[in-house]
């Protein structure tokens, strides 16, 4: 359970980091600004989906 919890928090932090603006980025993201990740918000969604899956699975076990 703790491994899943730590993993979900790592994914959450990674998802937040993909949306951070970065002036040194070479390309704009889909939202129109230069982000830490060029493919934001798609990468954010890809990282958030496993988080909800883990939390839903853990919630069902209680």
Image (cartoon, helix red, strand yellow):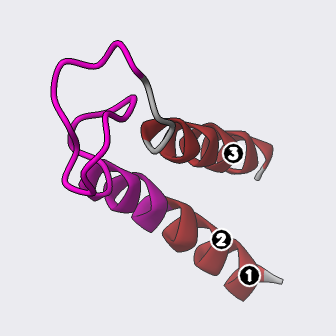
The span from disc 2 to disc 3 (Cα, nearest Å) is: 11 Å
Q: Is residue 14 above or below residue 27?
A: below
Of 41 and 54, nearer the camera is 41
Q: Which residue is mark 1?
A: 59
2 or 3: tag closer to the N-terminus:
3
Question: How would you classify the magenta stretch by its main secondary structure?
Answer: loop
Q: Is residue 16 magenta?
A: no
What numbered label is drawn on residue 55?
2
Label 2 environment density (alpha carbons within 10 Å; few <14, some 14–19, many ≥20) = few
**The magenta segment:** 23-50
Label 1 environment density (alpha carbons within 10 Å; few <14, some 14–19, many ≥20) = few
3 or 1: tag closer to the N-terminus:
3
The quarter of the picture where the C terminus appears is: bottom right
What numbered label is drawn on residue 9?
3
The secondary structure type at the circle numbered 3 is helix
The secondary structure type at the circle numbered 2 is helix
């Amino acid at each position: 359970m703790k491994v899943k919890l730590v993993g979900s928090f790592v994914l959450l932090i990674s998802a937040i980091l993909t949306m951070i603006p970065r002036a040194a980025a070479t390309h704009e993201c889909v939202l129109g600004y230069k982000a830490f990740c060029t493919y934001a918000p798609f990468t954010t969604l890809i990282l958030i989906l496993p988080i909800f899956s883990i939390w839903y699975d853990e919630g069902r076990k209680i």
